[in-house]
């Protein structure tokens, strides 16, 4: 049994990723299973399947304990984005949601404002200029001012004061249609 346990332990690979003070442990038991364990993970959730709005909302409710000041969600269904944003409690978002049972996918976010006031415009998701890419982000982009100046010189219009929006505008370069 000792041999078995030692072998099992040896087969476990620990990787430690440090992103913006966010700690994520990925435990990979070779061949069979892997688990992602987040410690201090941020207020982001994604979902693919039926009842997207409902499931994303439930996810945001479970993340509520982390503290936040506003929330947002974007759902892709039949080639269209539906976006909902609200300040204050996650329940304020619920009042705006158009629940739909059909298959789709989406991302949702609870925001803890670091750059820009607590407003609807600053709620995530943020969008690329062509409107084809929606992003949510937690943490801080240290060089966002430099990036924003460069992007504005290329006629990129920003609708928020967040650092996060630069990521969405940078992704325009990918030309995803
Ligand atoms: N820096 C971003 C903002 O101010 C994300 C904040 C967060 O971690 O929620 O919108």
Image (cartoon, helix red, strand yellow):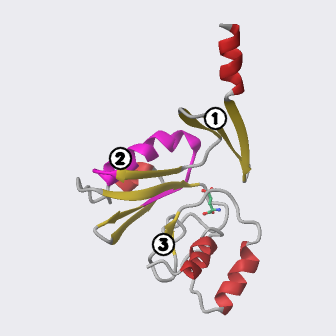
Sequence-wise, the earlier of marks 1 and 2 is 1
Q: Nearer the viewer, residue 143 or 66?
A: 143
Report which quarter residue 148 is drawn in.
bottom right
Residue 87, x across and y down, in percent: 48, 59
Residue 177, x across and y down, in percent: 43, 79
Q: Is residue 30 above or below residue 90?
A: above
Residue denoted by label 3: 133
Q: Marks 3 and 2: which is nearer the front?
A: 3
Instruction: Pick out the residue farthest to the top.
Output: 1
Describe residue 37's horizontal placement relative to residue 128 as left or right: right
Report, in whole angstroms, how far the alpha carbon at label 3 lies from the one at label 1: 30 Å
**Tag 3's secondary structure?**
loop
Q: Nearer the viewer, residue 43 or 51?
A: 51
Ligand 1 quadrant? Answer: bottom right
**Tag 1's secondary structure?**
strand
Residue denoted by label 1: 27
Residue 122, x across and y down, in percent: 55, 68
Q: Nearer the viewer, residue 125 or 19?
A: 19
Is the shortest distance between ligand 1 and the CB of mark 1 under 8 Å? no
Q: Nearer the viewer, residue 21 or 95?
A: 21
Q: Which residue occupies 41% across, 51% down?
A: 47
**Tag 2's secondary structure?**
helix
């Amino acid at each position: 049994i000792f041999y078995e346990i030692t072998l099992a332990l040896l087969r476990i690979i620990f990787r430690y990723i440090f992103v913006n003070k966010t700690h994520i442990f990925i435990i990979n038991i070779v061949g069979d299973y892997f688990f992602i364990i987040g410690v201090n993970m941020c207020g982001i959730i994604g979902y693919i399947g039926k009842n997207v709005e409902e499931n994303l909302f439930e996810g945001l409710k479970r993340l509520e304990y982390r503290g936040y000041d506003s929330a947002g969600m974007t759902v892709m269904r039949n080639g269209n984005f539906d976006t909902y944003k609200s300040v204050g409690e996650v329940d304020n978002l619920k009042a705006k949601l158009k629940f739909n049972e059909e298959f789709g996918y989406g991302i949702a976010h609870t925001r803890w404002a670091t750059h820009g006031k607590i407003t609807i415009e600053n709620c995530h998701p943020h969008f690329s200029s062509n409107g084809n890419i929606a992003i949510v982000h937690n943490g801080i982009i240290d060089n966002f001012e430099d990036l924003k100046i460069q992007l504005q010189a290329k006629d990129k219009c920003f609708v928020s004061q967040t650092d996060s929006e630069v990521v969405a505008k940078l992704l325009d370069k990918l030309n995803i249609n």
